[in-house]
Image (spheres, grey):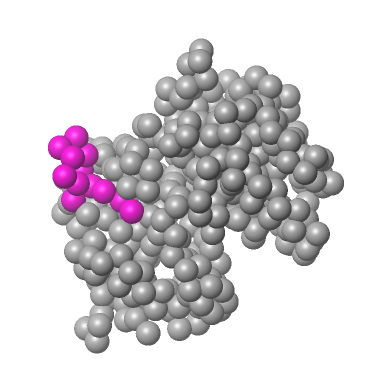
Amino acid sequence: MMTGVPCVLMRGGTSKGAYFLAADLPSDPAARDDLLIRIMGSGDPRQIDGIGGANPLTSKVAVVSPSSNPDVDVDYLFLQLGVEEATVSDRQNCGNLLAGVGPFAVERGLAPAGRPVRIRMVNSDSVATARFPTEGVAISGVPGTAPGVVLDFEDTEGANGVLPTGNLVDVIGGVPVTCVDNGMPVVVARAASLGITGYEPVAELAEDVSLRDRVQELRLSAAKLMGLDNTTSVPKTTVVAPAVDGGSICTRTFIPLKLHTSIGVLGAVSVATALMMDGAVGNELFSGSSRVDVEHPTGHLQVEVELDSDGRVRRSGVVRTARKLFDGKVFPR
């Protein structure tokens, strides 16, 4: 460890994380997780002795390796590192860091330049295709422009289906919700059902301890119904309200209890999937087609979801950007 660990720090979408080749990390998961906790400085709310940014959106890791699947270029394992707590979770995907996996794979020689990169998301055993042919793309929540990355998702339905409880609507503690999983387990509730408008600034909602407690009760009960055995980071909770800025829907998202300054890529895909289902929570607030313009606290995210007549997902996609911040070695505590 005195020689450091090769690492690339990249912004992917509206997140930031450390990208590693699997070969540069211990093969034993427990040893790997211990190393990453020390690299990121987790277990300290400031993450002052590591490269984590003291926020769940910047305490993320992508582990990339060649894929043994002949139809796929690389495998991508996402790990969410705790901030205050020294934890590592592989219970979810991250579509924002996914935006950086293709460029990282090309730069590290794991995939050829000049064509789309096929990526297996290890966390869900689903596949995404990344195409990054464009420059000068802007996305909400990120200053300036950067190379655009078009992500097309395949087989992102959760292990228990798009509706893991088997119901379009469940009532938890008197609150109607739709539990959905199309790449990310999410509980969708109307903002009004939780006594808020859904338009409040992030800082205002973050100070509402009563709201945070209600969200925690809601998501833990939903997790049982969804068959989730680890609730450290999932399900997320997204509250929805009528659009106010020309979009399809307005959102505020808890990850799992902190307010997201925007919305996660696969979280937005799951929310859009629920909105398109007749009778689901939020469907009555949404009028649109397969392209959903999701309003969030710092702007908009365009999501495409196509469902068949049985409510199964045909395809989903989104446009993100990614930018390399540094390439070198990181030294763990």
User: Is 143 on the left or on the right of 12, as rendered?
Assistant: right
Residue 268 seen in this snapshot = no
The mark total stands at 0
Q: Residue at point 73% right, 58% down? A: 212
Q: Residue 142: x percent and y percent? A: 53, 54
217 or 242, which lies in front? 217
Residue 287 locus on image (x, y percent): 67, 22
Q: Is residue 2 above or below residue 265?
A: below
Q: Position of residue 53 (x, y in %)?
A: 51, 71
Q: Is residue 225 left or right of residue 215?
A: left
Farthest top residue?
309
x 51%, y 15%: residue = 310
Q: Which quarter shows the N terminus?
A: bottom left
193 part of magenta stretch: no
Foreground residue among 328 and 81: 81
- The residue segment tinted magenta is 66-77
Visible in this render: residue 165? yes
What quarter of the picture does the C terminus occupy?
A: bottom left
168 left or right of 195? left
In the rendered image, residue 96, in percent from the top left (x then y), is placed at: 45, 50
Residue, x 32% and y 37% (percent of image)?
Answer: 127
Could you tell me which residue is drawn at 50 percent across and 82 percent down?
48
Answer left or right for 303 relative to 237.
left
